[in-house]
Image (cartoon, coloured by chain):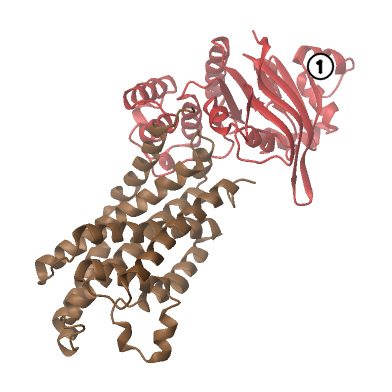
Amino acid sequence: MPDTSRTAISIQALKKKYKQVEALRGVDLQIPTGEFFGLLGPNGAGKTTLIKSIVGLVRATSGTLRVFDYDVQRDYLKAKAMIGLSPQEPNIDRYFTVRRTLEFQGGYYGLSRKERRRRATELMEQFGIADKENDEYWKLSGGLQKRVLIARALLTSPKILILDEPTAGVDVEQRHELWHHLKNLNKDGTTILLTTHYIDEAEELCNRVAIMNRGQIVEMGEPKTLIRKYCQEQTKVYPGSLEEVFLKVTGKSIHEDQSLKNGKD
Amino acid sequence: MEKINFRGFLTLVEREYYRFFRLAVQTIFPPIITTLLFILIFGYSLGEKIQTINNLPYILYILPGLAAMGVISNSFSNSSTSLFMARMDRSIENILAAPLSHLQIVGSFVIGGVTRGLVVGLTTLIVAKVMTPLTFSSLLGTLLSLVLISVTFSSLGIIAALWSEDWDHLATFTNFVITPFLYLGGVFYSITMLPPFWQKVSYFNPIWYLVDDFRRQVLGIGDLPAWQSQLVLWALALSTFLMAVRLFQKGWKLIH
């Protein structure tokens, strides 16, 4: 259960402008320690910009962003040490082997050689990629590449795990396996921030979700509460689902949203 | 006091070493072979037709320049390729998201470039020592000069990799900036052999000062007063390194 007395991620009036485009238009968000939080939104809503702002890959135009009381700009080393990120697009040296990729990651975060070797072995077994440890990343299938990205994010046992569309392009079985891992991690106290286009995924995993549209959070709450609030009438999806809430809040039609299922932000 | 992530820094350096030693056939051996060919051509073929310079056989005169040329092109190419590749495959984003300071990140790229520069430069000098009657005026000075030249061009490689938007840009920087300055930087001749106008032009070529200092450390002779070439060498090494760190701090073309 989330510990509401301590905030893991605190965002206030966050704005980001790229030349003419306002990617974030005053985002306010508090995520307590131990929460499994979902960020939903159509393509271009600002989800990835928000995530990149948290890990310091995007510099906000204004507003404040703190990770466990550390300002992500001023105390960036301390803030980054708390986070494990699995990005939407691979950001990996494609010619490094799986083991080396994982062990280097441990090194960047200050783990000893012995510890990073142990964690890499443990995670490769956990994610079913132990037999690929000496394969170069680019030679792996899309599903296995996703697993490496998630294993890499977990290598340092981060207090906050950020997953940007971790199950896009992953088959159903692997998706459910990952859900199982994530539920266990969250149970053990890891705060998880997840963005996804699979609404059922957010409904299944998250304590709370925020729906973003055009750079703003337009709705936020527990999935069940939102479903009660928005789903009193029969719709074309099925009665009383988070998917229906999403469509109503973002003003998308069901037909329009079909592309989102396999799309990217 | 804040704890420094020293292991993180060493891992970054290890990553650089792993990258270029893994590709040693492409990164280490070709420049050594090129220098050997230069020694053969200029030393045993064309060299005999050219007069001595400062009472030294032509091949001995150009040896430090040849070694410096290898150091310059390799340290530049190492850091520029490594960072540019990391920008292209976005692996730099993973490094930027880790708890590593900008100084540590730039430092690791520079150490990678310096190591590759030193490996190439020292191997060239060792081979030259075997093949020619080369003697060193100052071993320590030679080493220091090699390190400072490598720092300068590794840092410049970082700046070029940040500036470049594609491989063509990077090649443009190499072909139209580094190579002409290098070949007109006194590697193959003494400035006293040039007409007065071109002697004056050479004063605007920073590589000339570096080659001249390195030649002084190896052979004990140079065109410039020692303090002048030393001053330019230190100034270039410091200014290019600090500029690379500053660009990382600003997140130029890295953080949006």
Which secondary structure, mark 1?
A: helix
Image location (x, y in percent) of residue B100: 48, 36
Viewer-proximal residue among A181 and A159: A159
Tell me if residue A184 comes above or below residue A79 in the rendering.
above
Q: Is residue A91 visible?
A: no
Seen at 70% across and 26% down, the residue is A39
Pointer 1 local density, CA inside 10 Å: few below 14, some 14–19, many at least 20: many
| Residue sticking out furthest to the right | A233
Per the rendering, the colour in which chain B appears is: brown
Q: Is residue B223 shown left or right of residue B79?
A: left
Q: Which chain is red?
A: A
**Res A79 quadrant in image:** top right
Viewer-proximal residue among A174 and A87: A87
| Residue sticking out furthest to the bottom | B195
Q: Is residue B143 shown left or right of residue A69?
A: left
Q: Is residue B143 visible?
A: yes
Tell me if residue B177 comes above or below residue A43 in the rendering.
below
* Residue receiving disc 1: A226
Image location (x, y in percent) of residue A9: 66, 23
Instruction: Name the amino acid, label 1.
Output: Leu
Seen at 47% across and 40% down, the residue is A92
Seen at 89% across and 14% down, the residue is A232
Instruction: Say which chain tag 1 marks.
Output: A
Q: Is residue A234 shown left or right of residue B199?
A: right
**Res A36 quadrant in image:** top right
Tell me if residue A127 comes above or below residue B81 in the rendering.
above
| Residue sticking out furthest to the top | A1
Viewer-proximal residue among A11 and A242: A11
Image location (x, y in percent) of residue B52: 18, 85
Image location (x, y in percent) of residue B253: 59, 52
**Res B4 quadrant in image:** top left
